[in-house]
Image (cartoon, coloured by chain):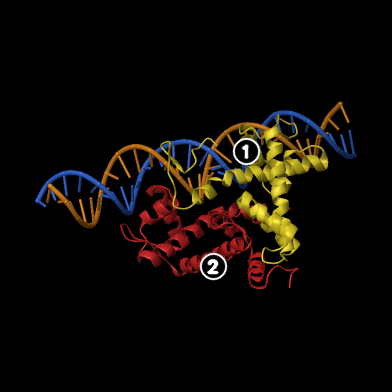
Chain colours: A yellow, B red, C orange, D blue
DNA sequence: CGAAAAAGTTAGCCAGTGCTAACTCAGGAA
DNA sequence: TTCCTGAGTTAGCACTGGCTAACTTTTTCG
């Protein structure tokens, strides 16, 4: 991402007492995941994704979308040319698919837990980026087989 | 936080199609919560909190801790004087207590779900900041009464 | 066709959260 | 007592991701 991860100091891995550094330096990737998900949605719904779709979706300005798309293009997740629609690269599509699956599991899980649809939608947006594979699998298991202690 | 929330444009509320703006502009508050939690921990464990405790805890440099503490002081969460220990204000203590409770619920919930202790610790760090009151209550309910569909 | 509206681009600003480097201050050991 | 070390401070940099403002391009409609 251009900047060294904050757990790297002078090329030497600085083992942290806890796992905070992951949480903070992943912030940019979270935005990347949100964007590729939104782009994939727009393409599947309307055939193409224009910057305006993202402006509406994220409620940010043109300029901000432009900035972010430029960064995603730099990072090899999207391709776009001036005044042309935005498209995903193979890597971008892969990330979008993976993010959406994770998102769906989290949202279904929250709803199954008794959370309202509206809250499940909101909270899953934030939570999905912090759920490890192990926790995701646990959620799938509960959705399929019920809560651990019960039959 | 000094900067206008990103859902405010020229003082007029710009209703978003989804709730992304909350997720992004809350990033600073997440760091604030992590810091006050860590400061409260240090004080309860060692009596005082020095900058070095936070340097070790978060695996960042002195300078970064200094920056962040200055911001927290500006925002009325901590008090400190040059070369003196860091202390929490009433507001800081309140935030720390609340964050820790939420953290504990999320972590217990993950463990009850069958996630390993290590993963529960890591994931709860990230998840706790995105869990609404409703979802937190649902977690408490499941911990107390079991999964909704089961008796 | 031509003008207005919508969409996209560019430039310049700010705040947050990292970093390094170069100080100052406080305390303990020789 | 002096000096070294560790803790704290300050200054200056980079990157992300917001914004406004001013511009160009494209599209749409009368």
Residue found at x 74% / y 70%: B150
Q: Quadrant of residue A88?
A: top right
Residue A91: x and y in percent read 67, 35
Residue ID for mark 2: B101
Residue B57 located left or right of residue D21: left
Mark 1 and mark 2 in contact (Cβ < 8 Å)? Answer: no
In this rendering, does residue A14 appear at all? yes
Element class at badge 1? helix
Which circle marks residue B117 in the picture?
none
Q: Quadrant of residue A139?
A: bottom right
- Out of B107 and A50, give the one closest to the viewer: B107
Residue ID for mark 1: A67
Residue D13 located left or right of residue B103: left
The relative height of residue A35 versus residue A108 in the rendered view (above or below) is above
Residues at discs 2 and 1 both on one chain: no
The relative height of residue A110 versus residue B60 in the rendered view (above or below) is below
Mark 2 vs mark 1: in front: 2
Residue found at x 60% / y 43%: A29
Residue found at x 43% / y 67%: B89
Element class at badge 2? helix
Q: Dividing the image into 4 quarters, which one contains the C terminus of chain B?
A: bottom right
Q: Chain of mark 1?
A: A
The relative height of residue A69 versus residue B69 in the rendered view (above or below) is above
Q: Chain of mark 2?
A: B
Residue B1: x and y in percent read 53, 57
Residue C4: x and y in percent read 80, 40
In this rendering, does residue B14 appear at all? no
Crowding at dot 1, Cα within 10 Å, few <14 / some 14-19 / many 20+, comes out as few
Residue B137: x and y in percent read 65, 69
- Out of B44 and A132, give the one closest to the viewer: A132
Residue A42 located left or right of residue B72: right
């Amino acid at each position: 991402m251009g900047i060294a991860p904050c757990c790297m100091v002078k090329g030497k891995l600085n083992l942290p007492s806890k796992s905070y550094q992951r949480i903070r330096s992943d912030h940019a990737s979270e935005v990347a995941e949100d964007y590729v998900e939104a782009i994939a949605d727009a393409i599947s719904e309307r055939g193409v994704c224009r910057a305006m779709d993202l402006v509406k979706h994220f409620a940010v300005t043109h300029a901000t979308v432009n900035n972010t798309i430029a960064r995603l293009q730099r990072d090899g997740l999207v391709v776009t040319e001036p005044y042309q629609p935005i498209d995903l690269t193979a890597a971008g599509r892969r990330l979008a698919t993976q993010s959406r699956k994770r998102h769906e599991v989290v949202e279904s899980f929250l709803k199954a837990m008794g959370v309202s649809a509206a809250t499940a939608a909101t909270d899953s947006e934030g939570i999905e980026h912090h759920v490890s594979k192990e926790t995701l699998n646990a959620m799938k298991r509960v959705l399929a087989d019920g809560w651990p202690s019960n039959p």
